[in-house]
């Protein structure tokens, strides 16, 4: 077995969801879940088929984000993984809808942070072991940090 670290290269403002599912129907069902939850969100989705032709299946409503998703799916080439790159919204606004799609087994991350994907490669194929999402902790928040966190959540509309 070989272990690989595959970095996700994306614009800083672009959000990402990486997950695993179990069926080719994932592509259409995730598309429907996203647009029914937030019709104005722009996204590109790619899914690595794990049997038969083993193609990268794709969909989305933004050409550049679809290209970002398909190119990273090919780099990963991990059976049944999916990547959703999104702009014009946050993962938290669609995450429950994504998790509730029947084929979705696991979410590895939902983030705008830099991401490294840890991949195991065997003679059979590849699989995602986990992700490194962002940076290591630098300290414990202070009262000033708590105030700033609360202000940010209200400024972006996630708290009243």
Image (cartoon, rainbow, N blue to C red):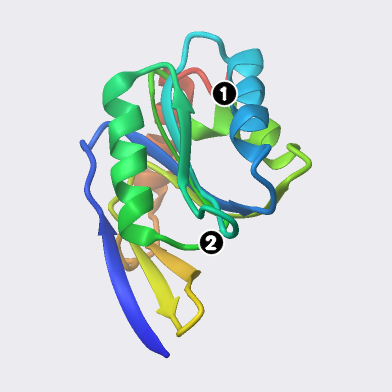
Instruction: Locate the N terminus by quadrant.
Output: bottom left
Is 114 left, or right, of 111 in this rendering? left
> Residue at position x 42%, y 79% from top?
121
Residue found farthest to the top: 40
Q: Which residue is mark 1?
A: 159
Residue 105's place in the image compared with 70, above or below, is: below
Residue 114's place in the image compared with 130, above or below, is: above
Residue found farthest to the bottom: 1
> Residue at position x 35%, y 30% from top?
66
**Residue 98: assigned label:** none
> Residue at position x 29%, y 37% from top?
68
> Residue at position x 57%, y 15% from top?
38
SS class of the residue under badge 2?
Answer: loop
Q: How many marks?
A: 2
Residue 61 occupies quadrant: top left
Q: Residue 127, can we see it?
A: yes
SS class of the residue under badge 1?
Answer: loop
Position of residue 134 measured from the top left corner of the image (x, y, whole percent): 32, 57
Residue 119 occupies quadrant: bottom left
Position of residue 133 measured from the top left corner of the image (x, y, whole percent): 38, 58
Is 31 left, or right, of 89 in this rendering? right
Determine the CA span between mark 1 and mark 2: 38 Å
Position of residue 78 measured from the top left corner of the image (x, y, whole percent): 47, 63
Q: Which residue is mark 2?
A: 79
Report the mark closest to the observer, 1 or 2: 2
Badge 1: residue crowd in 10 Å (few <14, some 14–19, many ≥20): few
Residue found farthest to the right: 102
């Amino acid at each position: 077995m070989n272990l690989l670290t595959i970095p996700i290269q994306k614009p800083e403002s672009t959000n990402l969801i990486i997950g695993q599912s179990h069926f080719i129907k994932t592509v259409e069902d995730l598309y429907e879940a996203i647009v029914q939850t937030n019709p104005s969100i722009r996204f590109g989705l790619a899914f690595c088929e794990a049997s038969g032709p083993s193609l990268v299946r794709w969909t989305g409503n933004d050409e550049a984000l679809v290209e970002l998703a398909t190119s990273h799916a090919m780099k990963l080439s991990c059976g049944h993984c999916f990547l959703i790159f999104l702009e014009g919204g946050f993962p938290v606004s669609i995450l429950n809808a994504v998790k509730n799609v029947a084929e979705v087994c696991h979410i590895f991350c939902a983030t705008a942070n830099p991401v490294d994907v840890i991949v195991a490669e065997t003679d059979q194929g590849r699989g995602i072991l986990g992700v490194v999402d962002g940076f290591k902790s630098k300290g414990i928040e202070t009262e000033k940090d708590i105030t700033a966190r609360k202000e940010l959540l209200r400024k972006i509309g996630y708290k009243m």
